[in-house]
Image (spheres, helix red, strand yellow):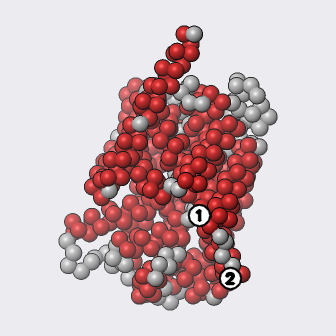
């Protein structure tokens, strides 16, 4: 393998939409609605408003990423923006945190989710429960299988995502449309909560919007493969805008269809029993046991697609870090035939498996604060680049500059403060894990200098 080999641009517009949709429409669409309802006191009107607001904020985020990605269409995404705006140490801290915790943990979590849903399918069909060790083995096998699949070219992985986008879109849309057409419940669109003050309602809405971000998560990852997108100045912004807008409409209508089929009393009963997958209840109400099988199968397909998309996207960041000489040297190697960062893919898979084996529930909760910190820095970098590089080629410019990005930054800072207040200890630990990247970075630099002086 020659280290001078470069990544190949093979992702078109539909491929970009498939990657984003594959990550965004994972498991969140099926269970986050329960948490949104809990945080809005089971108000359908407020719940639908929260889903809409969450989607609009995510679109604002995507518009900023669209300009950054079109201006710097390189593999690595957020790492590149942080490096160019603030320098390698800050960028390394973000990439290091994602490698040892956030991104690798996401892959592991999706693999576990796939095994849990597969186990539910076995219980439903054959009344058979998989032992814990078997689910762990299945989770590891899924990571290995999809990592191997992504070795053989980004086009192959992108085509797989296209297929699974169609496979999961058809049943999701079918259940949603059936719920809208055949549902008989009167949905209450009221936005008031009795005698609650406006301030308390706004606080409640903010807390609920944060919950929707789990379902909207994944919108950043197309930028990580920007170095492999055809005509990125056009296709990257369009993919972000089309996907985030479409997913927002999908989430709002999907939850409306559930409210149109199940009464609030029935939903409260389900949630109290721990039945958080409301779509299964709605599908059974409309289509009987067949509807239940359809939703479980769709959940399996959705998580599989999201797992494949994350395995494709995350290693590109580690590849960019290696290209800068601040990460494992082998991660910069590109296969001469398939044009993929094979060692970065393998390293990402290995880290995910390690987290899967040793457990990651507590670790994942620690990075929410850190993620918001780096997102804030990335959004601010838009202003940094406009000032430092006024003449840079910008095939796409964010709408309503500087007002929209300024509002987006204020919203993100407000969410950052809210998360810190709500979870002080995890936020402090998460901050510590981020700062740990600094001594690691300078240790790598010192080692390189010592090696060069020999």
Report the quarter where the N terminus lies: top right
Q: Residue 370's spot in the image, x, y percent?
A: 40, 46
Q: Nearer the viewer, residue 153 or 234?
A: 153
Identity of the residue drawn at 60% across and 77% down: 175
402 up-or-down from 412: above or below: above
Residue nearest the viewer, comparing 131 with 90: 131
* Residue 122: quarter of image: bottom right
Q: Sort mark 2 into few (<14), some (14-19) or many (20+) by Cα contacts within 10 Å.
A: few
Separation of marks 1 and 2 at Cα, in angstroms? 19 Å
User: In which quadrant of the rendered view does residue 166 lie?
Assistant: bottom right
Identify the element where label 2 is drawn.
loop
Q: Nearer the viewer, mark 1 or mark 2?
A: 2
Residue 378's label in the rendered image is none
Judged left or right of residue 365, residue 245 is right
Q: Above or below — where is 82 with respect to 244? A: above
Q: Residues within 10 Å of mark 1 (few under 14, many from 20)?
A: many
Q: Residue at x 53, y 67 (%)?
A: 29
Q: Which residue is mark 2?
A: 127
- The C terminus - image quarter: top right
Q: Is residue 396 visible?
A: no
Q: Earlier in the sequence, mark 1 or mark 2?
A: 1
Between residues 54 and 398, which one lies in front from this camera angle? Answer: 54
**In front of the other: 287 or 423:** 423
Looking at the image, residue 112 lies above or below residue 284: above
In the displayed structure, does residue 395 sit left or right of residue 14?
A: left
Helix, strand or loop under label 1 = helix
Residue 216, given in percent of the width and then of the height, sits at: 49, 58
Res 113 label: 1
Marks 1 & 2, CB-CB < 8 Å contact = no
């Amino acid at each position: 393998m020659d280290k001078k080999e470069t990544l190949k641009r093979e992702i078109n517009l539909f491929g970009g939409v498939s990657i984003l949709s594959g990550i965004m429409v994972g498991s969140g669409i099926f269970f986050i609605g329960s948490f949104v309802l809990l945080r809005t006191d089971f108000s359908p009107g407020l719940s639908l408003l929260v889903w809409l607001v969450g989607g609009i904020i995510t679109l604002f985020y995507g518009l900023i990423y669209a300009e950054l990605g079109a201006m710097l269409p390189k593999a690595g995404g957020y790492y590149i923006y942080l490096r160019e705006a603030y320098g390698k140490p800050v960028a390394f801290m973000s990439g290091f945190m994602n490698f040892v915790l956030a991104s690798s943990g996401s892959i592991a979590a999706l693999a576990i989710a796939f095994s849990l849903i597969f186990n539910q399918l076995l219980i439903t069909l054959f009344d058979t429960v998989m032992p814990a060790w078997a689910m762990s083995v299945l989770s590891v096998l899924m990571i290995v299988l999809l990592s191997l699949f992504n070795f053989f070219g980004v086009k192959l992985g992108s085509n797989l995502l296209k297929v699974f986008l169609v496979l999961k879109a058809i049943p999701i849309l079918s259940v949603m449309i059936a719920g809208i057409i055949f549902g008989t419940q009167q949905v209450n669109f009221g936005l008031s909560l009795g005698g609650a003050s406006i301030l308390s309602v706004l606080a409640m809405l903010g807390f609920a919007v944060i919950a929707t971000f789990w379902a909207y998560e994944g919108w950043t990852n197309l930028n990580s493969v920007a170095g492999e997108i055809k005509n990125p100045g056009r296709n990257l912004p369009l993919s972000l805008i089309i996907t985030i807008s479409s997913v927002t409409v999908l989430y709002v209508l999907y939850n409306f269809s559930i409210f149109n089929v199940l009464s609030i009393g029935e939903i409260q009963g389900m949630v109290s029993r721990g039945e958080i997958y409301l779509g299964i209840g709605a599908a059974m109400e409309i289509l009987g046991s067949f509807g239940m099988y359809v939703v479980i199968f769709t959940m399996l397909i959705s998580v599989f697609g999201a797992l494949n998309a994350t395995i494709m996207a995350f290693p590109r960041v580690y590849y960019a870090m290696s290209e800068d000489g601040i990460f494992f040297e082998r991660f910069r190697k590109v296969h001469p035939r398939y044009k993929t960062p094979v060692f970065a893919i393998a390293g990402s898979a290995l880290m995910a498996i390690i987290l899967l084996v040793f457990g990651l529930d507590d670790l994942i909760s620690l990075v929410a604060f850190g993620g918001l910190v780096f997102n804030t820095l990335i959004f601010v970098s838009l202003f940094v680049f406009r000032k430092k590089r006024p003449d840079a080629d910008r095939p796409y410019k964010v709408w309503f500059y500087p007002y929209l990005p300024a509002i987006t930054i204020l919203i993100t800072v407000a969410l950052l403060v809210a998360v810190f207040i709500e979870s002080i200890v995890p936020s402090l630990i998460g901050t510590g894990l981020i700062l740990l990247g600094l001594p690691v970075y300078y240790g790598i630099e010192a080692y390189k200098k010592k090696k060069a002086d020999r």
